Amino acid sequence: MTTQSRIEWTEQTWNPTTGCTKISPGCKHCYAEVMAVRLHAMGAAGYENGFNLTLLPERLMQPVRRKNPTVYFVNSMSDLFHEDVPDRFLDQVFSVIRETPQHTYQILTKRAYRLLKYFGGRACPNNVWLGVSVEDRLYGVPRIDYLRQVDAHVRFLSVEPLLEDVGEIDLAGIHWVIVGGESGARARPMKPEWVQRVKQQADESGAAFFFKQWGGWGADGVKSHKKANGRMFAGRTWDDYPRSRQLSL
């Protein structure tokens, strides 16, 4: 089965692969790794290998069996464009996506360089929202240029966990910007001025802005529980979606 998601900007998760490897500072306290360890200990299907990358072809047809239009976050527990996921498996995933135009698929990756290689000779389906993670200047910001070169119906950034002021960023061709702080016992703090700078640039470019969470540190710079810190920024919640498709979640 696909899983009802607690992620604020989606509805369901679909994980045709599980497991990953760390490639940048945003991966340091990976929530998926922690969850995979727990699921492995519980004997959950799909996590027999813990957090080692695992292809799960038996899950490929899950969205086909769901007729109601659904927003899927693809691979909340992995990275679909991991270098060890073969193109032939990606082809199968995107075949299912094309077969289910009633659904919307949000695909997020840190392997932005692979987007150009894969989509260089293939069209990105219209029901795909394609995104990259942008946690800092060195690793995160360069991913935006790779994303911009793919002809995706919606391109988005997950600026989470926001680990520093990412400076001036080019948001041309970017439709949606999500910002969030890190959660968990070892969460690194996020400063309000970092968020404000991203939001200002999103507003100026016309990109929709979604503030996901403060995470383990509040706007006051005090470490606290994620729920206590909440989702308010600058006096309100920001739940905007791309104008090309407004969602009711």
Image (cartoon, rainbow, N blue to C red):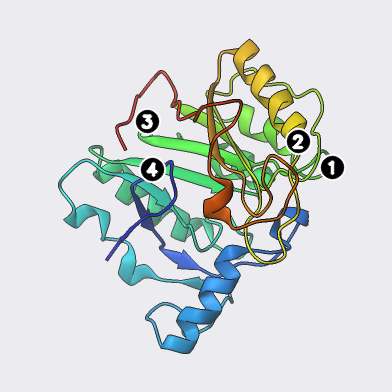
Of residues 72 and 5, which is closer to you in this image?
Answer: 5
State the image quarter where residue 21 is shown.
bottom right
The label shown at residue 141 is 2
Secondary structure category for the residue under label 1: loop
Mark 4 and mark 2 lie on one chain; the one further toward the N terminus is 4
Of residues 50 and 59, which is closer to you in this image?
Answer: 50
Mark 2 and mark 3 lie on one chain; the one further toward the N terminus is 3
Report whether residue 122 is seen: no
Q: Position of residue 52 (x, y in %)?
A: 59, 76
Q: Position of residue 185 (x, y in %)?
A: 67, 67
**How many angstroms separate mark 4 from mark 2 (CA)?**
23 Å
Q: Are marks 4 and 2 in contact (CB under 8 Å)?
A: no
Residue occupying image coordinates x 25% and y 45%? 99
Name the residue tied to disc 4. 105
Name the residue tied to disc 1. 138
Which amino acid, mark 4? Tyr
Name the residue tied to disc 3. 126
Density class for disc 4 (Cα within 10 Å; few <14, some 14-19, many ≥20) is many
Mark 1 and mark 3 lie on one chain; the one further toward the N terminus is 3
